Amino acid sequence: MLRVSAKGMLVVVIMALAFMITPVRAEGFAGGSGTAEDPYLIETAEQFNTIRYNLTAHYKLTTDIDLSGYENWEPIGTANAPFVGALDGTGHTIGGLSIDRAINDVGLFGSISGNSRLENIKLSIGAGGIKGRDRVGGLAGSASCTNGIIRNCTVAGPGSVSGFFDIGGLIGQASFMTGGDNIIQNCKSEVDISALYDKVGGLVGRFEHGRIERSYAAGKIEGRMYIGGLVGYSYARNVQESSVTDSFAIGTVQAKGMSGKYHAGGLVGYGYGISQSVFNIKNCYAAVDLSGTAATKGIIVGEWDSFFKITDIYADGVAGKCVARTEEETHMNKLTADMKRQATYANWDFSAIWAIEEN
């Protein structure tokens, strides 16, 4: 007869529990266990595609990824089931992304939320471009994070980004949660953007309750209403500050509205604050060809309300107003020759943030 002592049974139970709580490498990944300390390692497009089956894990690219084998990429994460994990691209390129879907929340990621982190990602949009309805962006269609980080990410062509409402080169709609700390930092978009309707920006179409720092957009931006070279529509409320600092936009901005308040700006189309919540723009510039039928156009900002603050902002060119108000803001409007001199940019940090080749 086989006898097992109570002590022996206890050892067996403890060993079984230890096995159950030990992170196990997911089959199909190149390594890792999906934690922040030991993220899943991705080395193929097929492995990248499986992110959609675990939206809470941490991932890291170990090489460049080519998504051209997916002719019509299905965005990762939806409004009802957003991506809340983290992806570190480690400087590698995700290339060949093409999407054509008549849905909302379209991009490499459809929707991200929570404390999601997207870092060190280089995204190349295929010739087919990214097409959707509302909330369309290269990296993500929408971001509704509480403490989200989007850092060191770039979006480039040859393809473009297009849709109806809330369209941006990097993020379509970044409506971050109030009370959190959300940041878009060291990011750039170098793609053409077009929206059939409203809230379209070179970097972000609609931006609420967060910070954009050290970022830029370059391309051709087209839309009907609230169009900006960097941000189309910006918003702050619930005594929370939103800001754009040390950033710029270059390229063209074209407003196609026929009548009414179709605001367009070289940097920001429309800035809006409520209940003492301030939207700040500081240490930025725009070198944008601004055209179209917008009711109000400004080389820096199309229109803004009372809780909107601009500091040390400059625009290239003498045509038009830097900020579309009844008064001319000539002190910010500089000749091209002046824009090539460091002395023009009062209070800017040329030791750690900015650099310039004189003339």
Image (tube, rainbow, N blue to C red):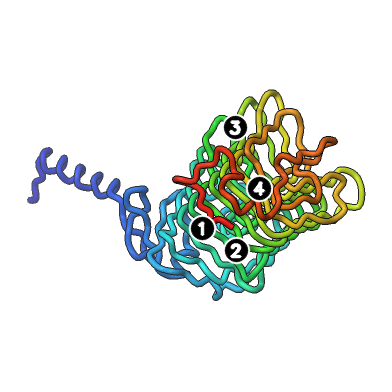
Using the rendered image of the protein, determine whether residue 308 is visible from the camera's viewpoint. yes
Would you call the spot at circle 2 few (<14 residues within 10 Å), some (14-19), or many (20 or more)?
some
Residue kind at label 3, given as amino acid type? Thr
Q: Which residue is mark 3?
A: 178
Query: Looking at the image, is mark 3 or mark 1 earlier in the sequence?
Result: 1
Left/right of residue 344 with respect to residue 87 in the rendered view: right
Query: Looking at the image, is mark 4 or mark 2 earlier in the sequence?
Result: 2
Q: Residue at x 56, y 48 (%)?
A: 342
Is the residue 346 above or below the residue 45 in the image?
Answer: above
Q: Which residue is mark 4?
A: 173
Residue kind at label 4, given as amino acid type? Gln
Residue 74, numbered label: 2
Query: Mark 1 touching mark 2, by CB under 8 A?
Result: yes
Query: Looking at the image, is mark 3 or mark 4 earlier in the sequence?
Result: 4
Q: CA distance from mark 1 to mark 2?
A: 9 Å
Which SS class for mark 1? helix
Q: Which residue is mark 1?
A: 52
